[in-house]
Amino acid sequence: MIKTRLTLCIILITATLNAADSPDLQIVTRIRQEGFRNSKVMEIAWGITDLSGARLTGSPNMKKANEWTRDKLTEFGLANAHLESWGPFGRGWSSESTSVRMLSPDTQQLYAIALAWSPSTNGPVRGNVKKVKLAAKEDLAKNRGTLAGAIVMISDPPELKPQDKAALERYDEAGLEKLGAYEIPPLRDDARRREGAARREFRKLLAQFAMDEKIAAILQAGRGEGGGLFNVQQSGTWRDDEPMGVPTVNLAPEHYNRIARLVDAKQPVELEVDVRTKFYDEDRNAYNTIAEIPGTDKKGEIVMMGGHLDSWHSGTGATDNAAGVAVMMEVGRILKSLGIAPKRTIRIALWSGEEQGLFGSRAYVAQHFASRKDPKDPEQAKLPLGQRTTDKGELVVKPDYAKISAYFNIDNGTGKVRGVYAQENAAAAPIFAAWLEPLHDLGATTVTMRNTMSTDHISFDEAGIPGFQFIQDEVEYETRTHHTNWDTYERLQREDLMQAAVVAATFVWEAANRPELLPRKPLPK
């Protein structure tokens, strides 16, 4: 009899939980109708990419994008749209032009882009090319006094092979099933972080060495598959306490390799390099764009959504991450169009500084929800939070920490949403599975307990706040667009972004209206 009562009790509890988290199908229908019949997602993406341009944190274009998104969210009817400063970040930077020409033994215009925070050449400079290994302290000592006035190649020539797989990547059923299976994480190994810290320290040494030796310019090979596609990030620094280095450019792999072969064959190569960049010191802060849909009876509680607005400078940051920003702004527009206020306040945040280390979202979490004391280890205290290995510092929570239910993020390109990472939150997984039920016909089917790293939901997750990233089809993200000069409006897929907005809007609405806050994992140690 006791066993029967216990079984009945379990059934009733399960039924209650399922009822509480069964999606409101009337609202799901309205979200789908608005998202598929009246979408503005491509219009939003155009404003972020073509209109605003590349959006390096601290640059005028980034501020322009902050202001454009703020005004667009206001136009959509969201409340309290504003820019929220964090920082100081440091020096702003933009690239005006880069030209690299071969003068001998042949003449050729080369494909080149200056790396972020590279200084200018102050007019065209000509010099002979030297191919030198500068990968460790001993390399610097060995080459001291030999490179003045030279244009120096420091990358190994990349090997380019025909592509052995299609650039387009989407999940099939087998891939989703594999992703849905949890993988036990390996034992914690801080070797990778230590290696990263060592690379950052060596970059400072190399920058100072290049300045001291009066190197005219540095050439690096842009990573990529060739054919005009290459990866461009940073060489210089936004910080005042680090050496700026010398003008540094990435060349298309084919052009870099030609020069390397000529130099290896003892053929003198002369180049002309003209790098024109600009630094901005008037405003050392950076900004996040924030707006809200106010709640009703639970308006003091918050559900957040967002993506990072900043980008690198060689393209217009379309898949990384105008796609995610446009989707989340479209979510705000869709939900506002329903004409029904959610129970909890829904807040959108468009971050800056993500590419430099999740700076904008980490600062926001620290300002509003929870911060960390300085680590006891003085060496760890010198490092940004994301680079600390053995001691992150004690977590100190603020009053609003208890009021935030969850943060949802999109930042894996233009691909459609196929599900969600539960970030090892077992209590959240069945809730998400229920919310996905009416979206299976859109291809959104999978909840995985796995962690996924490296974007702004981590700023929340590492503070013990439920932070989630959606699973997306990669499309061309890793093969062609991530941090490359091809990351432009043309790579965006309209139907995928519309689908992503409908799925994300469903999750945000359900989170804002369920009886309780979403369950949390234990506080991080």
Image (cartoon, rainbow, N blue to C red):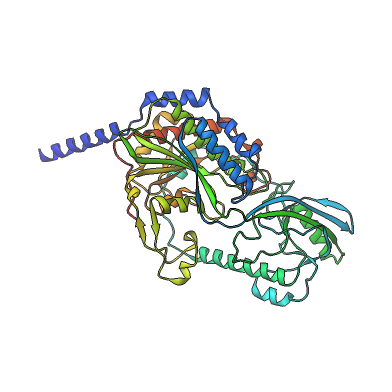
Residue found 69% across the figure and 74% down from its top: 140
Q: Residue furthest front?
A: 282
With respect to residue 8, does 375 lie above or below?
below
Residue 138: image quadrant is bottom right
416 lies left or right of 511: right
User: Residue 358: in sight, yes or no?
Assistant: no
Residue 513: image quadrant is top left
Residue 35 place in picture, x, y as percent: 50, 27
Task: Locate the N terminus and report the quarter of the image it occupies.
Answer: top left
Residue found 38% across the figure and 43% down from its top: 406
Front residue of 441 and 153: 153
Residue 205 place in picture, x, y as percent: 64, 70
Task: Locate the C terminus and report the quarter of the image it occupies.
Answer: bottom left
Front residue of 53 and 189: 53
- The number of numbered discs placed on residues in the rendered structure image is 0
216 lies left or right of 523: right
Residue found 42% across the figure and 32% down from its top: 506
Front residue of 65 and 107: 65
With respect to residue 509, does 315 lie above or below?
below
Residue found 46% across the figure and 65% down from its top: 389
Front residue of 104 and 69: 69
Residue 17 place in picture, x, y as percent: 27, 36
User: Residue 187: in sight, yes or no?
Assistant: yes
Residue 143 place in picture, x, y as percent: 74, 75
